[in-house]
Amino acid sequence: MRIILFSGKGGVGKTTLAAATGVRAASLGHRALVMSTDAAHSLGDSLALRIGPEPTRVMDNLDAMEIDAQHELEREFGPIKNFLTRFFKGQGIEEVVADEMAVLPGMEELFSLLRVAELAQSRRYDLLLVDCAPTGETLRMLAAPDVLRFYFRKIFPVQRVLARTVRPVAPLVTSLPIPEDDVFAAVKRLYERIERLDPLLRDPKVTSIRIVLSLEKMVIAESERLFTYLGLYGYSVDAVIANRVLPDSLKGAYFERWGKTQARHMKRVREGFAALPILESPLRDEEVMGTLLLRTLSDEVYGERDPLSVFHTSRPPKVEKRGDGYVFSFDLPFASSDRVTAYAAGDELSVTIDNWRRNIVLPRSLSGREVVEARLRSGRLSVVFGGR
Ligand SMILES: Nc1ncnc2c1ncn2[C@@H]1O[C@H](COP(=O)(O)OP(=O)(O)O)[C@@H](O)[C@H]1O
Ligand SMILES: [Mg+2]
C-alpha cells in the first residue's frame, strides 16, 4: 500500500502529474485511486471526466474522486462543533464568533486526510494519489493532526474531569456546559482516527510527498520552503518533479533565453535537492488532458520506473544520549537558524520556523528536561536536552 501526495505552488502541474501517475500505475496493473483535496477541484477536467465525492471509474484499475471536505466535516464533527460553540458562548463569546471558533483552521483539510486514511485502510487500492491544494493549504492539512491532538488534550480532559466529578452540581458552580455522552463518543472516535493517521502518513515506506515545481525563481523558492516545513512535520519527500521543462527542439530563437534560464534554475534545484531524484516533465504543445495525453506525459516523467516505488526516504528523527542529557534531531532542509525557535514545556517540544509551528510530544526520557541548545547543521536541527 502506497500513498503519494503531489504538493507545490498553484498552477505548477500537481493535478496533471497526480492524474498522469494514476494512469501510468493503472496500466502497470496497480489498483490506483487519484483523489483531489483541493476545494477548487480540477481533477475531473484533467481526466476529461465528471467525477464526484465517491470513487468514480476512469479506466481499468483507476478510480478518481474529488473529496467534499465540508461535507466530511459536517458529518463527523457536527456534535463536537455544537458543543464547542456552547463552550465558547459560555465563556462570554458572541454566538457568531463562537461558531467560527469551533472550527479550527486546518479542520476541513484534516477531514480530507482522514478520508485518505480510511481509503488506505479499506485495502481496495494499492496506491492512493493525492492531488493537493497549493502549498499553504496542504501544509495546514498536514499540520492538522498535531494541532487537533494538541487542542483536544487542552480542552477535553478538563471537561472530562469536570463532567465526572461535579456533574450533578456543575450547572450551579460553573457556566461551562458539560459535554453529553455523544460528544465524548464523537471526540473519542475522532481522536482514535487521528491517532491512526500517524503510522500511515509518517511511515516513509507508505507515504511520500512528490514536490512539483516549474523552473522559475519564485516557484523554486516556495518549493524549498515547502521542503523545510515538510521536515518540520515529519513527512518524507521521495522526489521532485520539474514540470514544463522546455524540450531541446524549442531552445533556439525566441526560447533561447528561457532555455538558458531554465538550465540555470535546474542547476539550483539539483544542488538544493541533491539527495532526491529530480524527475523531468516536458512542456507539451497543448494542455495535458484526458488519459491518452496523461499516459504519454507520465511515460516521459517516469521512464522505466514504477511510479509506486519509494524513490527516496528522508532520514528519520533520532534521539541520542549525550552525557546525562539527550539530543533530539530531525531534518529541516534549507532552514537557517535565524528562522527557527525551539523550546520545551512539560512533555512537549515546540518548534517554530517562519509561521509554522509543531508541538511534538516528547519520548518519556526527554520530558521535563530543559532545552540547553538548538543547533542547525547541514539541514538538520539538533535540540540538546540537559540532565534532570
Ligand atoms: N507539462 C505540461 N505541458 C503543457 N501543459 C501543462 C503541463 N503541465 C500542466 N499543464 C497544464 O497547465 C495547467 C495547470 O496544471 P494543473 O495540473 O492544473 O496545475 P496545479 O494542479 O498545480 O494547479 C493545466 O491546464 C494543465 O493541462
Ligand atoms: Mg490542481
Image (tube, rainbow, N blue to C red):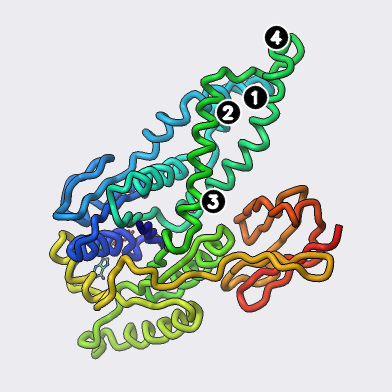
Nearer the viewer's eye, disc 3 or disc 4? 4
**Number of other residues with Cα within 10 Å of mark 3, as a class: few under 14, some 14 to 19, many 20 or more:** many
In the rendered image, which quarter is residue 300 located in? Answer: bottom left
- For marks 1 and 4, give the CA distance: 25 Å
- Ligand 1 visible in quadrant: bottom left
Q: Which mark is residue 234?
A: none
- Residue at position x 49%, y 67% in the image: 222
Q: With 41 as the anchor, is 29 left or right in this view?
A: left
Above or below: residue 332 compared with residue 266: above
Whichever of callouts 1 and 3 sits on the residue coming sooner in the sequence is 1
Q: Earlier in the sequence, mark 2 or mark 4?
A: 2
Q: Dot 4 corresponds to which residue?
A: 168
* Residue neighbourhood size for the residue with mark 2, other residues' Cα within 10 Å, grouped as few (<14), some (14–19), many (≥20): few
Q: Position of residue 182 (x, y in %)?
A: 51, 20
Res. 294 in view: no
Q: Position of residue 293 (x, y in %)?
A: 16, 66
